[in-house]
Image (cartoon, helix red, strand yellow):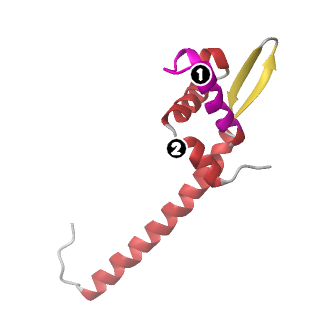
Amino acid sequence: MQPNLATTFAALGDPTRLAILQRLLAEGERTVGEIAKDCPMSLPAVSRHIQVLEKAGLIERRVRRQWRVCRARPQALEMVADWVEVQRAFWTASLDRLDEMLTRQHPDAKKD
């Protein structure tokens, strides 16, 4: 099952999960213990945050001997980037049309 945009945004909407993802993107693979060491919460709480990120497809976990290793999946952010780009294009075009309409209605108005 591929996560949907709402699941992805919900996962990214928590500051702890966002910090975990940013760290994995910047630093590469980390064990759950290494991630938990920098979080001001219990290991079980960190594990729950990691599960949410994994369910959203933003990270993947694998077993390396006795450790659980987490890795970011940057390609999962493409869905977010695509959505943001569609919104940016829509609003840019809408504001451009509004500007044109206002310019036609008030040609002598001072522009900044």
Q: At which x and y percent is residue 52? A: 65, 38
User: Tag 1: residue type?
Assistant: Glu
Q: Secondary structure at mark 1?
A: helix
Badge count: 2
Q: Is residue 95 magenta?
A: no
User: Tag 2: residue type?
Assistant: Gly
| Residue at (44, 73) in percent of width and height | 94
In the rendered image, which quarter is residue 35 located in? top right
Q: Which mark is residue 27?
A: 1
Q: Earlier in the sequence, mark 2 or mark 1?
A: 2
Residue 73 visible in the current orientation: no
In the rendered image, which quarter is residue 26 located in? top right
Question: Mark 1 and mark 2 in contact (Cβ < 8 Å)?
Answer: no
Q: Is 109 positioned to the left or the right of 42 in the image? A: left
User: In the rendered image, which residue does mark 2 sit on?
Assistant: 13
C-alpha span from label 2 to label 1: 21 Å
Please say if 10 is above or below 86: above
